[in-house]
Amino acid sequence: MNTDTHNKPRVAVHKFSSCDGCQLAFINLGEPLLELTKLVDILHFAEAGPVDEDATVDIAFIEGSVSTSDDLARLEKIRNNSTYVITIGACATSGGLQALRNMANTDDWGADLYANPSTLKSLDDSTPIKDHVKVDLELWGCPINQQQLLTAIRSLLFGVLPQEENDKVCMECKRQQTVCIMVTKNEACMGPVTRTGCGALCPKAGRDCFGCYGPAEKPNTHALANRFQGFGLASNEIARRFLFIHSDAESFHQEGQRWKTK
Amino acid sequence: MTDSKTININVPVLARVEGEGALDLTIKDQQITDLKLRIYEPPRYFEKFLEGRNYYDVPDTVARICGICPVAYQMSASHAIESIFDVTPSPWIRSMRRLFYCGEWIQSHSLHIHLLAAPDFLGFNSVIDMSSQFGDEVRRGFKLQTLGNDLVTLMGARSVHPVGVKIGGFTKAPDQKSVDNLLQRVSNARQDAIDLIHWLDTLDLADDEQDFVSVALHHSDEYPFNEGRIISDAGLDIQISEFENHFKETHRDHSTALHCSLNGKPYLVGPLARINLNARQFPDEVKNIMRELKAQFPSKNMFHSIIARAIEIYFCILEAESILTDYQPVNDPFMKVQPKAGTGFGCTEAPRGILWHRYDMDEQGCVSKANIIPPTSQNQSRIEEDLKTALIHFGLDKPKQDLQLHAEKVIRNYDPCISCATHFLNLNLVRNGQKENNTLETAFFPRFKNIKINKTVIIGIGSPQEKDEAGWQAIDVLKHNHHFIKLQNRGLTLIKLNRPGIMLTDSLRGFDHAVLIDATKPDISNTSLKWVDIHKIKSRGSLLSSHEIGITEALEWINSIESLPKDIALLGVSNFEPSQLTDIILSCIENKPKQ
């Protein structure tokens, strides 16, 4: 990728079904956002102003999940126009909180939801970007933070893909010497199976992790769920712990379903 | 420009708004004949997700409705649920919630002023362009935005989807050192906020007085954040629990957001409405500044909204300063709660206006029903009404690009948060249990997953003889359907074949997904459109086709020589309505919900 200031790398920020919270990782940068625009050309970023959906770019950031048929068409075009496709946040990476609808009885919902279905083209499922096109890098988190974003951009400016952060929140707690929520409060903390990257925010704030960064590498969800049962959580409550922000991420989905049907 | 000219303005992607919206406007003979603020952001059904969830999941769930105003969602939900559990927040919690809200208003308003609205008034496309000429102003804006975010972070550990909120209060009390650091920065920001107000007051804002009703919370002792009655400048004065008696939501086809009206009419919520109704509650420092301004409040000029935001930023800085100055850490930053069944209401002032929640909870403390009405749904009718008036005032004979920019400016005044507005489509819709297209009802219903449209082919099979043209007619219908024209532009292939037999293989080669359309023998089915399960039919030989060599035999032949496309579906047709045909095929290739 070219870092020559006269020929800056081109960047687009696209939005699908989402809350806009991950785009705020750019917008909340403050003054560094202006610095960033000296390093890269932002060609499409509707919320911040530039609109050129069809621009050919070096990096396309995608927020949000695929949930309409029009999304599929847009997504294909973005993939064709981009060297790197990077998903930002839970929705783009695992389908997000709205993927909870994937487990609903859509036949029932279909009749419920649309007064006039011809005006809407909502798909049955809310699916991550990687289900439809090749994704070069995933930034997990609901929402992602600025550090993740800048790390990714800086690495790509040097032509390398950043290293994936996928160890557990527990490790981060230990590094920061945060008191263990599960041990001291008997709270059903998801830290043992959740990917780090947040800085162990919840345990530091005195509460249980609820898994908003998605599954860590090799998560032992089974052992953790059994521990939750030991705390006295009912099966459906255990299921809800796993079926929340990342209900469609494979390991959380499977563990959740296991307890849901008990 | 002559009077008889028709001008179409179509803004497919509205820039500098939160979420996805578009504007369609048609002017004919100097009259607006069509005006639609189209919100096409897909609905996300949050209220459905809340059903069955425990109360302690609610703040983390509703925050995800909006990345820009998660605090508002957490606050309205907390108040509603606490009212069911008979919990009254302690004075410490009440005060910290006001501080939390100050942070959100400061960040959201600063973001809107500098990134979304000001470029309009100064003639730039974005804050990035604007920063070349207005570097100091932009940096000041970013500084305020960061300060707001840091105030939210003080209580919530992060500014987007804060994690420090629980039903009953906060998970942790901030330590004195963090509070002292922030207090210093808040005090230093006073002058920035004052300068911001004066700067915006010098902008050349359009003078466009309009007649509208303002609605906001009102509290007798303070400028409203979390508590109060809902009042209007047309005499409304109700408890938040009475909301549904006066406000109604309706669904319009062009928008995935519901429109909310007050006694059948549009109304305004948000900073301008709040100031119009609550300016007396401001401390003297704010009132004194307001007296010096060119823009005077109460105001009926929507373009004064940007100044109203700046005034509220200044108020929030004073309020935060006072709360942080009096701050004392506590051991119990939350009230203990005991779940109870009941119905509760929460209404707080999100940056964009009142955000109303209603929850029905069962004895275990699980949500049985939720209803959430965000500010942008409430403003949507007002935006459309404003656009009509504002564009007439502006002059319908103006050049198209000027009209478009003015329309966008008008919309951005409301700081519409489209992500917020669209998650509620399923609510309050009349349930229409009757399924209309019974002909589409079949036991077998193919749906292609992970479809690549440029690897998709739809083949109509027929012949000119023996009334065997249905497959071809189907292709003709698809060729002229706007949706399929778009799909063809993206690479969809449509083919007509004349009784291909095993030569079908030539047409399938290279495709991953195929829909075959063939005439149904009238005697085997009384429905006009029917999916046929190829696998079932294979063993019994061809029952479907009226051709000598049926499709299923052909497919079996092909499969024995080379592999078939990954997805293959066979649709039997006889007499059909074009719309039924397009719907049934879309449901297969685009995974659209069954109707």
Image (spheres, rainbow, N blue to C red):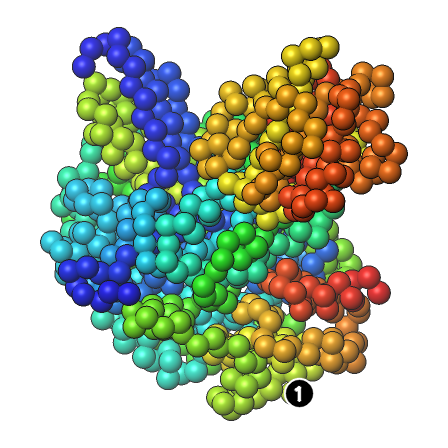
Vertical order, B286 against A168 (above or below): above
Q: Position of residue B336 (x, y in %)?
A: 65, 72
Q: Position of residue B212 (x, y in %)?
A: 37, 30
- Residue at 20% over, 10% down: B2
**Front position in the image: B485 or B94:** B485
Vertical order, B585 against A147 (above or below): above
B445 left or right, relative to B101: right
Vertical order, A216 against B520 (above or below): below
- Answer with the quarter of the image where residue B546 lies: top right
Total marks in image = 1
User: Is residue A16 something that shows in the picture?
Assistant: yes
- For numbered disc 1, what is the local secondary structure? helix
Q: Amino acid at mark 1?
A: Val
**Front position in the image: A78 or B275:** A78
B54 left or right, relative to A66: right
Q: Which residue is mark 1?
A: A183
- Residue at 26% over, 12% down: B5
- Image quadrant for the C terminus of chain B? top right
